[in-house]
């Protein structure tokens, strides 16, 4: 944090959308503690004024102005840039944190709510980016930071389709903006995407919920202050993508190394843990169409700080499971060609026995088990390994091993 503090001088001008609550609010306070001059935007005027007061009190040089604005209104967002220029003369950093969640099966969320969530999460962020880049291109420098989510591509989870699609759009839009900035020669203007995993904010209280089910705490939850530190660090040393959260940086790797395991884990966690609380709740559109108002706060109700040990253990266990699976799928297994062999595949894994190998028919040989077909099982699976070509008996030869996987097993692969 000290290096970040040195890199971000007091007086840095920062515009933040979504500043009334959660991550945006934590980012505002963190910048204020360094003596930044802030333009804070969201729809909840009262909550925003309170944040502005807290920010001003945080540091003798800190200044803050609250500008109530709906990010879906392009003119209102342009007005944020104008306010910053009029009061402070420039924009050094622009953080697009305004966003809203939508929970529900894709065929259950009304199209109007999907559209509205895309308007807030995608178009609202794009309005912010356009306003920021207009100023930053003019002054020749600046850092734009868009808050996406690990759900925007690093992983997927059921019931989050509409929201995740919006967050994935941000990843693509930012990538394109980076390319365009290089082409136009604006080398000192940076576009950064921050991708948090679960964060302990009132986000889930504010999300539209079409599942009729109560949302429960997930074990891996970061504090909004941690995300704010990552945002400050990114402002000081811009990077294209920054993943934040316990174990979250492992997720893109885990998805490559053990995609089935990650998908299955998240599916089960979402279904049985995250939405597994007993009882039902009424369907709600959350803060899609109305400001969060009284429920706006930095933290949610998930006591993230107290969960540090649990989430570290979770991250370690997940890393261990992924590592073990990686080793298992690449390990050599002794099998007898032409015979039925028990191959332990552990829980849900990809098994491919279609590789060529040197071996003697009828005798034990080494076969490399590599992914091709997925065999869903938590127990040893019967795989029939059969030579395809005729082989000379008694001497080493190349044998193509083909799996015989019972259809019953394959049907469980999806
Ligand atoms: N919490 C998580 O687990 C998590 C994980 C990954 C990414 N994120 C992302 O982080 C960002 C911040 O979320 P959060 O967790 O801090 O949730 P939050 O506490 O609900 O904050 C959302 C903020 O966005 C503002 N907002 C919503 N709709 C708006 C609109 N139409 N116009 C202007 N402001 C609007 C809200 O203010 P008003 O209601 O006052 O307008 C509020 O300040 C979001 O983009 C979210 O997608 C969150």
Image: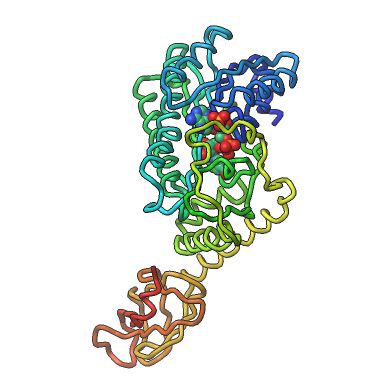
Q: Residue at x 69, y 46 (%)?
A: 304
Q: In the rendered view of the protein, which quadrant contains the N terminus?
A: top right
Question: Residue 206 placed where, x, y %?
Answer: 56, 40
Q: In the rendered view of the protein, which quadrant contains the C terminus?
A: bottom left
| Residue 20, quarter of the rendered image | top right
Taking the image as drawn, is residue 318 in sight?
Answer: no
Please state if 276 lies on the left or on the right of 178 as rendered.
right
Q: Quadrant of ligand 1?
A: top right
Please state if 351 lies on the left or on the right of 60 as rendered.
left
Residue at the front extreme?
282
Residue nearest the viewer, comparing 112 with 41: 112
Q: Residue at x 39, y 79 (%)?
A: 409
Taking the image as drawn, is residue 202 in sight?
Answer: yes
The colour style of the image is rainbow
Residue nearest the viewer, comparing 57 with 8: 57
Residue at the left extreme?
390
Identify whether 338 is placed above or below 83: below
Question: Residue 54 placed where, x, y %?
Answer: 71, 23
Q: Residue at x 68, y 23 (%)?
A: 50
Identify whether 3 is placed above or below 110: above
Question: Residue 383 placed where, x, y %?
Answer: 39, 83
Residue nearest the viewer, comparing 179 with 286: 286
Identify whether 47 is placed above or below 23: above
Question: Residue 386 placed where, x, y %?
Answer: 32, 85
Q: Residue at x 50, y 42 (%)?
A: 101
């Amino acid at each position: 944090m000290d290096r970040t503090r040195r890199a971000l001088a007091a007086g840095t001008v920062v515009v933040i959308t979504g500043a009334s609550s959660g991550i945006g609010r934590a980012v505002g306070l963190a910048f204020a503690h360094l003596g930044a001059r802030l333009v804070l935007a969201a729809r909840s005027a009262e909550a925003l004024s309170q944040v502005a007061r807290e920010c001003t009190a945080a540091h003798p040089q800190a200044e803050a102005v609250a500008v109530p604005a709906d990010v879906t209104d392009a003119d209102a967002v342009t007005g944020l840039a104008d306010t910053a220029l009029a009061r402070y003369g420039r924009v050094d950093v622009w953080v697009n944190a305004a966003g809203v969640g939508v929970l529900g099966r894709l065929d259950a969320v009304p199209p109007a709510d999907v559209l509205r969530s895309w308007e807030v999460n995608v178009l609202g962020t794009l309005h912010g980016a356009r306003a920021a880049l207009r100023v930053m291109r003019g002054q020749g420098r600046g850092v734009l930071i868009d808050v996406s989510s690990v759900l925007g591509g690093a992983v997927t989870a059921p019931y989050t389709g509409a929201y995740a699609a919006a967050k994935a759009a941000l990843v693509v839009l930012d990538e394109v903006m980076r390319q365009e900035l290089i082409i136009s020669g604006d080398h000192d203007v940076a576009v950064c995407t921050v991708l948090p995993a679960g964060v302990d904010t009132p986000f889930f209280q504010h999300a539209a919920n079409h599942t009729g089910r109560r949302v429960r705490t997930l074990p891996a939850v970061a504090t909004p202050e941690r995300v704010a530190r990552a945002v400050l660090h990114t402002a000081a040393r811009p990077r294209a993508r920054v993943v934040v959260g316990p174990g979250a940086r492992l997720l893109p790797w885990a998805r490559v190394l053990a995609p089935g395991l990650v998908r299955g884990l998240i599916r089960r966690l979402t279904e049985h843990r995250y939405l597994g609380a007993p009882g039902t709740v009424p369907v709600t559109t959350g803060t899609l169409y109305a400001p969060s108002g009284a429920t706006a706060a930095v933290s949610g109700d998930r006591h993230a700080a107290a969960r540090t040990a649990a989430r570290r253990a979770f991250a370690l266990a997940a890393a261990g499971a992924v590592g073990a699976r990686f080793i298992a799928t690449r390990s050599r297994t002794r099998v007898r060609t032409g015979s039925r062999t028990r191959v332990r595949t552990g829980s849900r894994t990809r098994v491919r026995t279609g590789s060529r190998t040197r071996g003697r028919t009828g005798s034990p040989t080494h076969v490399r088990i590599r992914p091709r077909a997925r065999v869903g099982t938590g127990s040893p699976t019967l795989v029939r390994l059969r030579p395809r070509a005729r082989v000379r008996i008694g001497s080493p030869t190349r044998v193509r091993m083909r799996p015989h996987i019972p259809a019953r097993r394959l049907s469980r692969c999806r």
